[in-house]
Image: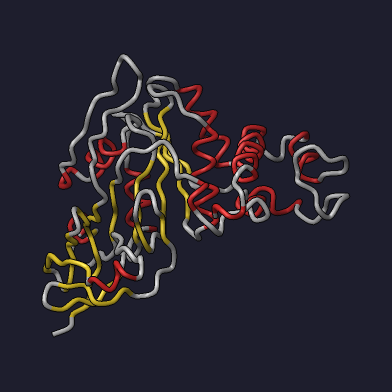
């Protein structure tokens, strides 16, 4: 008998599919392998006799980490230990916006460097991104309320570099998860990878039976790789920087790259402080990365 569910975990070719409150462990049909299709966590699927037989059309996919149908991406960075790299944060935001995923920035370890935490918060809140600042001792009621109001009925995920405190923060918000955590290595100032796979946790487990939707902790990674998405191109890049939007089309040259041209409306906005300088620097860095990829490799 065919049943429908959502993949909440995938490991070693086995997929945990949640259906009507019960989890079934399934494998993918050989047909998927022949068609070079891999089921992802977040996929809505049809399964029968412990085999996934169909995948519902996806609204989006991420290859690393492998996820589908993501609605909200919480981008976690630390004020210090490890020091944040705004270019990395901006790449995540750019790809999220390109994929139709709402980015949310969380700055942790405010106690280690309040000034830097305020700087980061200022950058991202100024461009219309929901931004939160936290530390181990801070009140997290505002962030918890955001989850309750914005994440119900949606798939959300935590992402960011290792050691920034993703799992620690999730545990503080939702003690029921009991996620593994690790310390930051003193030698290299980077975190140990404590999360080994992507797994969705039902919000009903956290907020009660009437709360649908899921949240995921993801393996630590330094960035979403912009080179692995065929539809993520130099031409579309300006449209993934949301604060550029009011100025696109206002440049002197129709093929303006927004990097150095005279009469560029974006550059003028940067010089006037309407666009954060670090965001424009990240745009230039991303543009160079995308320019370096030959078209036949996409």
Decide: is 198 above or below 286.
Answer: below
Residue 98 coordinates in the image, percent (x, y): 54, 56
Q: How is the image coloured?
A: secondary structure
Along the viewing direction, whichever of 141 and 130 lies nearer the viewer: 130
**Quadrant of the rendered image containing residue 212:** bottom left
What count of labels does the image hold? 0
Residue appearing at x 17%, y 43% in the figure:
175
Instruction: Say left or right for 161 vs 257.
Output: left
**Quadrant of the rendered image containing residue 143:** top left
User: Which quadrant would the N terminus be assigned to in this image?
Assistant: bottom left
Along the viewing direction, whichever of 111 and 252 lies nearer the viewer: 252
Decide: is 213 above or below 129.
Answer: below
Instruction: Say left or right for 191 vs 288.
Output: left
Residue 257 coordinates in the image, percent (x, y): 76, 46
Residue 265 coordinates in the image, percent (x, y): 81, 46
Residue appearing at x 35%, y 55% in the figure:
156
Residue 267 coordinates in the image, percent (x, y): 77, 39
Decide: is 9 above or below 57.
Answer: above
Decide: is 4 above or below 74.
Answer: below
Instruction: Say left or right for 131 vs 187.
Output: right
**Quadrant of the rendered image containing residue 6:** bottom left
User: Which quadrant would the C terminus be assigned to in this image?
Assistant: bottom right
Residue appearing at x 44%, y 63% in the figure:
60
Residue appearing at x 59%, y 46% in the figure:
293
Q: Extreme top residue here?
A: 187
Q: Extreme bottom residue here?
A: 1
């Amino acid at each position: 008998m065919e049943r429908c569910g959502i993949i909440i975990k995938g490991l070693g070719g086995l997929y945990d599919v949640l259906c009507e409150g019960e989890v079934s462990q399934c494998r993918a049909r050989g047909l998927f392998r022949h068609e070079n299709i891999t089921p992802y966590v977040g996929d809505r699927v049809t399964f029968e006799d412990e085999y996934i037989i169909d995948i519902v059309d996806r609204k989006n996919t991420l290859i690393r980490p492998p996820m589908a149908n993501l609605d909200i991406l919480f981008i976690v960075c630390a004020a210090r230990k490890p020091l944040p790299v705004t270019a990395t944060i901006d790449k995540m935001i750019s790809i999220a916006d390109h994929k139709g995923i709402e980015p949310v920035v969380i700055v942790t370890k405010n106690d280690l460097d309040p000034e830097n935490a305020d700087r980061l918060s200022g950058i991202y809140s100024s461009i219309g991104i929901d931004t939160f600042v936290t530390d181990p001792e801070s009140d997290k009621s505002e962030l918890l309320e955001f989850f309750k109001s914005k994440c119900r009925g949606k798939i959300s995920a935590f992402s960011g570099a290792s050691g920034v405190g993703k799992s620690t923060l999730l545990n503080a918000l939702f003690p029921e998860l009991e996620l593994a955590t690790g310390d930051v290595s003193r030698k290299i100032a980077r975190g140990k990878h404590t999360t080994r796979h992507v797994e969705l946790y039902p919000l009903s487990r956290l907020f009660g039976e009437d709360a649908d939707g899921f949240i995921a902790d993801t393996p630590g990674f330094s960035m979403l790789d912009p080179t692995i998405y065929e539809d993520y191109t130099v031409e579309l890049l300006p449209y993934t920087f949301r604060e550029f939007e009011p100025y696109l089309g206002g440049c002197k040259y129709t093929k303006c790259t927004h990097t150095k041209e005279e009469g560029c409306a974006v550059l003028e906005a940067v010089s006037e402080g309407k666009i954060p300088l670090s965001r424009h620097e990240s745009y230039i860095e991303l543009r160079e990365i995308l320019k370096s990829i030959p078209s036949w490799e996409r």
